[in-house]
Amino acid sequence: MAWAQACPPMPTAQMSFQTDMVSPVYRNDRNRAVVTQLAGHSGNPNLRQHGLTRSETDFQLAITLAIADLGNNRLCVALKDVKGTWLLSLLEVDVVSELAPGTCPHGVVRAHENQHVALTKQVFTRHMAPMRARFAEVVRGIKPQLIRGSAAQASRQFQSHILTEMKIALAAYNRDVAAANAVIDTPENYRSETAKCPVWK
């Protein structure tokens, strides 16, 4: 595609950006070996994994195009409507099945994992505005383009460009959520929490 030099006036893109968060799902059916593997720590025989909180985000994009047929297999294409949706799509909490509900260790681990849930949601909420701003900046930066080919091909290229440009903001969120959760995953904090229960199994 080339930047348009002979396109007629094209409409300004209408854009919307939505966010949403799933509710956390709590599990007590996976044993320590499985949860340790999910955490990526299965190669450390000295680690006793008691719980785990996993989260994922998903950025979805839907676009429609304004198209002007210039003849001779030439099209002028522009963004007409762009909808971005950023979801906190996974928030799953495990307490290993060896720790039964109602026991002191189960309560301590669940409370710790709930801190991770709260931190993840806080960071996601804090990044909503920067994500929205980046989305608007990227969409506004896309000009009408003159192409030889199909509108479907142009649509795929527009989508690819937007998704690539959004990776900067998504990477910033991933760094921040990892840093926020690392604050409570320290040896000192683990020792303090372990001391709350006389017996751990």
Image (cartoon, rainbow, N blue to C red):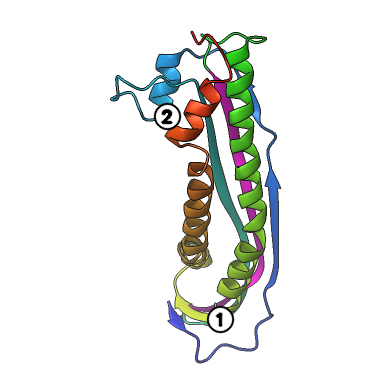
Numbered disc in front, either 2 or 1: 2
Residue at screen point 48% across, 27% down: 191
Judge by depth and name the residue closer to the eye, 183 or 152: 183
Q: Quadrant of the N terminus?
A: bottom left
Residue 23, image x, y percentages: 70, 34
Image quadrant assignment for residue 144: bottom right
86 is within the stretch colored magenta: yes
- Which residue lies at the image location 47% right of the left edge and 12% below the top edge? 31
Q: Residue at x 52, y 62 (%)?
A: 169
Quadrant of the rendered image containing residue 7: bottom right
- Image quarter of residue 69: bottom right
Find residue 54 and report its horizontal and vertical position in percent: 53, 34
Q: Pointer 2 and pointer 1: residues touching (CB < 8 Å)?
A: no
Residue occupied by mark 1: 144
Q: Considering depth in this image, is 91 or 179 the residue closer to the camera?
A: 179
* Secondary structure at numbered mark 1: loop
The local crowd at label 1, few if under 14, some if 14 to 19, many if 20 or more residues have their Cα within 10 Å, is: many
194 shown above or below 88: above
The secondary structure type at the circle numbered 2 is loop
Q: Earlier in the sequence, mark 2 or mark 1?
A: 2
Depth order, front residue of 109/132: 109
- The location of residue 122, given as percent across then percent down, is 66, 49
Residue 73 visible in rendering:
no
In-image side of 174 versus 127 (left or right): left
What mark, if any, has residue 39 been given in the picture? 2
Q: Which residues are magenta?
A: 73-95
Which amino acid lies under the numbered mark 2 shown in the image of this protein?
A: Ala
For residue 183, above or below residue 35: below
- Few, some or many residues within 10 Å of mark 2 (<14, 14–19, 20+): some
The alpha-carbon separation of the residues under discs 2 and 1 comes to 46 Å
Could you tell me what secondary structure mostly forms the magenta stretch?
strand
Residue 196 visible in this rendered orientation of the protein: yes
